[in-house]
Amino acid sequence: MAFANAVLKKDPKFGVIGLVPCSVSGKGIRWWSHGNMPYEQLLRKVKISLRDGGELRGLLWFHGESDIRTEFDATHYKSNLQKFIHDLRTDLNSPLLPLLMV
């Protein structure tokens, strides 16, 4: 809610802000790919939120702590994140979807 409130404080005419929580604690970036539960749930929840006229305007990405446990995961985080963003933009037909990293 802090994010939504900050946006509305800056632009009170922004309109309704809906946040679609999709967090899964302790899952590394590898879990956020096609076929894995977190990714598929994220797609499902976003598509449901768009059914009644919602508009996808961005993604808040608060992630990465579990990917520092091993050197391998840390080294591959960037490429895995790039793939996640590409796949998500493709699957949601939103090629310019902004991603805000927290």
Image (spheres, grey):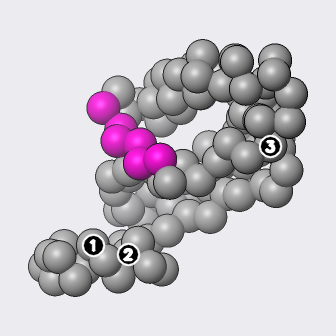
Q: Quadrant of residue 66?
A: top right
Q: Tag 1: residue type?
A: Val
* Badge 2 or badge 3: first in the primary sequence: 2
Q: Is residue 40 visible?
A: no
Residue pointed to by mark 3: 66
Real-space Cα distance between discs 1 and 3? 29 Å
Q: Is disc 1 in contact with disc 2, using a CB cutoff of under 8 Å?
A: yes
Question: What residue is drawn where x is 38% and y is 62%?
Answer: 54
Q: Identify the disc placed on residue 86.
A: none
Residue at (31% x, 77% y) in the render: 6
Q: Secondary structure at mark 3?
A: helix
Q: Nearer the viewer, residue 25 or 42?
A: 25
How many marks the image carries: the answer is 3
**Image side of residue 32 versus residue 52, left or right:** right
Q: Which residues are magenta?
A: 96-101
| Residue 7, label in figure | 1
Q: Which residue is mark 2?
A: 4
Residue 14's spot in the image, x, y percent?
19, 73
Q: Give the x, y percent position of residue 23.
A: 71, 57
Q: CA distance from mark 1 to mark 2?
A: 5 Å
Q: Nearer the viewer, mark 1 or mark 3?
A: 3
* Image-quadrant location for residue 30: top right
